Amino acid sequence: MPLLIVCDQFLNRCFTLSVTLCQKPFQVAFSKIILKPKNNNLMKLLKLSLVGGSIALAVVVFFACKKNADDPSVISAAKVTKITTPVITCGTATQASIEIQVCAPQGGTGLPAGFSIQWMTKTAFAANGNQWYASEDERLCKASFSGNANLSRYNLAAGQCVTVKVGEFLFDEGASTNCGDELKCDSEYVFRAFGHATNTLNRSDFTNPLLSCATRPCGSNGICTYTQGYWKNHNPNICTTYPTSPLCIQWPASSVTLGTVSYNVTQLLSIFNKPAAGNGLIALAHQLIAAKLNIAKGADATAVAQAIIDADNLIGGSVIPPVGNGYLAPAATSALVTALTNYNEGATGPGHCQ
């Protein structure tokens, strides 16, 4: 990068300033400035002045670059002031959830502080004049995925992606929402997202245009299934304090065996309430507990029988946190987690309960 040098002989000082030019090469002589640009879009000024008996020489180069899409030599030197807007796409959907893939574009700032997703039903969006609810409106569903939390998987470098499941959040470090309930079956939703601000960059713009994704059609064959979120929020322990609450139900089993270890209701609830935080064993246990409760309730197990056998064999004698300190890598459990989730949420098997 060329330098602009300003000298004051009386003060015996020289100063250098960085100068970014659009074109090369250039030469500077004492009496004149010789410029050899590719096009005539540069202006220049040589200023020689006498100040207080001292001679101050300043060589100032002014330049104006006109953006020309056909000229690859013109490169924008604008300072980056905000996070690059993420890219979101629809993923796999069940009757109760929709996966959203969030990517930090190549060549951008990445998403070092994470991102947020907002969503509404398409029906509500249309009824609101095809406008989003205001941010403070409680009807607007929001989820934040912080990239600053310990063990967070949401601090994305440029070119990286992560998938989150809206409607059946399996929270890990850095994730929170005001809408943790499952989505409605056979319904279309609209989504938008933005990248979180950092200490040096403002938050990104919202993704645009809005993203539209739909859950699977309603319906079930025979006795249906519930999600792990349903079993976590509807349980016998609530009956102790709120016996008339609609969340007070008796589970179809007083204990569930995971691997070779048996857990009572209180222990199972503690596992449900433990974020996976990068531990594949916990994520697997969440879905395995739900699948076994669904089968104990009477749901047809044909579609998931082999996945349950494989999951129990993989877990073995490991004791699941927070009851114990067992651990499995997410890569070792992801396929089984997906198979069990699809069963619990109605993508396979008898279908999700509505």
Image (tube, rainbow, N blue to C red):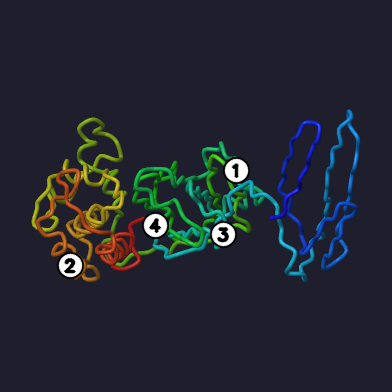
Lower position in the chain sequence, tag 4 or tag 1:
4
Left or right of residue 229: residue 194: right
Lower position in the chain sequence, tag 2 or tag 1:
1
Lower position in the chain sequence, tag 4 or tag 3:
4
Disc 2 residue type? Answer: Asp
Lower position in the chain sequence, tag 1 or tag 3:
1
Disc 3 residue type? Answer: Leu
Q: Which residue carries the number 2 mark? A: 310
Q: Residue 226, relative to residue 38: is it above or below?
A: above
Q: Residue 73, relative to residue 130: is it above or below?
A: below
Distance from disc 2 to disc 1, alpha carbons, whole Å, reads 47 Å
Disc 4 residue type? Answer: Ala
Q: Which residue carries the number 4 mark? A: 96
Distance from disc 4 to disc 1, alpha carbons, whole Å, reads 34 Å
Q: Residues within 10 Å of mark 2 (few under 14, many from 20)?
A: some
Q: Which residue carries the number 1 mark? A: 202
Observer-nearest residue: 295 or 162?
162
Distance from disc 1 to disc 3, alpha carbons, whole Å, reads 23 Å
Distance from disc 4 to disc 3, alpha carbons, whole Å, reads 18 Å
Q: Residues within 10 Å of mark 4 (few under 14, many from 20)?
A: many
Q: Which residue carries the number 3 mark? A: 211
Q: Mark 4 near mark 3, Cβ–Cβ under 8 Å?
A: no
Please state which of the two labelled residues, at mark 1 or mark 3, is closer to the viewer. 1
In the picture, the quarter occupied by the C terminus is bottom left
Q: Mark 2 near mark 4, Cβ–Cβ under 8 Å?
A: no
Disc 1 residue type? Answer: Asn
Q: Residues within 10 Å of mark 1 (few under 14, many from 20)?
A: some
In the picture, the quarter occupied by the N terminus is bottom right
Secondary structure of the residue carrying tag 4 is loop
